[in-house]
Structures are given as C-alpha cells and as structure tokens.
Image (spheres, grey):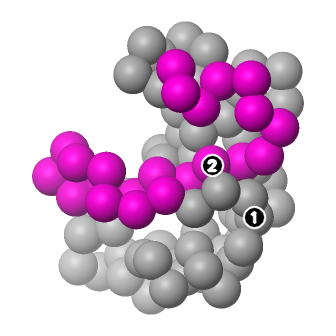
Amino acid sequence: IDVYQAWCGPCKAVLNLFRKLKNEFGEDDVLHFAVAEADSIPTLQPFRNKCEPVFLFCVNGKIIAIVRGVNAPLISKKI
C-alpha cells in the first residue's frame, strides 16, 4: 500500500518497479498494489504530515513490513 499525503499524491517514482513486479508475480494473483490517502483514513493517522513516501506490506489484513522513503531494492526485497 502506497500511503500518501493529499497534497502530493501517490509516489510515481516506483510505478515502473510495481509494474515489473506485478508482471513477475501476476499469474499467481497473490500480489496486489493499492494507494491510500493518509489524511482521509483514520487508521493511517500515524503516517499523516510526513514528507516521505511510506509503503506498507500486508498479509491477510495485517501490516508485516514498512518501508519509509523510495528504496527500490528494499521494496523488491520486502515483496
């Protein structure tokens, strides 16, 4: 989940990485990407008013990892 602030929108710098990963894992339908505006979702309140992108990794509705900032090798590793 790409958690973003309303004033800046989702992180476009990782779109190509997400497309590549989706193509690699897409056949199994186990990998899904989503965006969430921190300002409008109460659960994401801890991520509000931050200037860096935050990526949450969830399995069965539970957050299992967090990557702060755009770090493509780390994001790939977490996935």
Image quadrant where one finds the C terminus: bottom left
Q: In the image, which residues are magenta?
A: 45-66
* 10 versus 60 height, above or below: above
Secondary structure under tag 2 reads strand
Q: Residue at x 81, y 61 (%)?
A: 13
**Residue 78: quadrant of the picture:** bottom left
Image location of residue 27, percent across then percent down? 29, 80
Amino acid marked by disc 2: Val
Image location of residue 77, percent across then percent down? 50, 85
Amino acid marked by disc 1: Val
Q: Is residue 22 left or right of residue 58?
A: right
Image location of residue 9, percent across then percent down? 77, 32
Q: Is residue 34 left or right of residue 47?
A: left
Image location of residue 20, percent across then percent down? 59, 81
Q: For residue 51: magenta?
A: yes
Residue nearest the viewer, comparing 46 with 76: 46
Spatial CA distance of label 2 from label 1 is 8 Å
Q: What number of labels is visible?
A: 2
- The residue identified by callout 1 is 70
Q: Residues within 10 Å of mark 2 (few under 14, many from 20)?
A: many
Q: Residue at x 83, y 38 (%)?
A: 51
- The residue identified by callout 2 is 54
